[in-house]
Amino acid sequence: MEEMEARRIVDSYADMILRISSAYVKSRSEAQDISQTVFLKYLTAGKEFDSYQDEKAWIIRFLFMRPYISAVQVYRGER
């Protein structure tokens, strides 16, 4: 993946991922760790998407598949 493509991904989704992560974990540093994990997975997955919506949906699905998000939801009785 080219550097410009990686920058586009981060610029497009960083705020969204951080907001969603922050809603489920206690500290900003944990939310930032989650964000880094999501970007790393995306950049190494080598996926190509037909549209912006497909790309965004994949990122959100991957974010909610993370064990720490699920664990927090279970602890809070949300799952």
Image (spheres, rainbow, N blue to C red):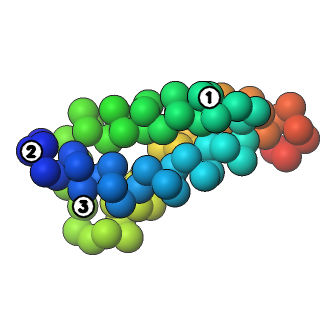
In the image, residue 58 above or below residue 77: below
Q: Which mark is residue 2?
A: 2
Q: Quadrant of residue 21?
A: top right
- Counting residues from the N terminus, which is met first, the one under dot 2 or under dot 1? 2
Q: Amino acid at mark 1?
A: Glu
Comparing labels 1 and 3, the label whose residue is closer to the camera: 1
Q: Quadrant of residue 11?
A: bottom left
Structural distance between the alpha carbons of marks 2 and 3: 15 Å
Q: Secondary structure at mark 3?
A: loop
Q: Which mark is residue 75?
A: none
Comparing labels 2 and 3, the label whose residue is closer to the camera: 2
Structural distance between the alpha carbons of marks 1 and 3: 28 Å
Q: Amino acid at mark 2?
A: Glu
Q: Residue furthest right?
A: 77
Which residue is at a point 29% across and 53% down the rendered structure image?
9
In the image, residue 72 above or below residue 4: above
Q: Which mark is residue 49?
A: 3
Q: Amino acid at mark 3?
A: Phe
Q: Quadrant of the C terminus?
A: top right
Q: Secondary structure at mark 2?
A: loop
In the image, residue 78 above or below residue 25: below
Q: Secondary structure at mark 1?
A: helix
Q: Which residue is denoted by mark 1 in the rendering?
A: 30
Structural distance between the alpha carbons of marks 2 and 1: 28 Å
Which residue is at a point 55% across and 47% down the rendered structure image?
18
Q: Are dots 2 and 1 in contact, CB under 8 Å? A: no
- Counting residues from the N terminus, which is met first, the one under dot 1 or under dot 3? 1
Q: Residue furthest front?
A: 28
Q: Quadrant of residue 12?
A: bottom left
Q: Residues within 10 Å of mark 3 (few under 14, many from 20)?
A: few
Asked whether residue 49 is in view, the answer is yes
Which residue is at a point 27% across and 71% down the rendered structure image?
51
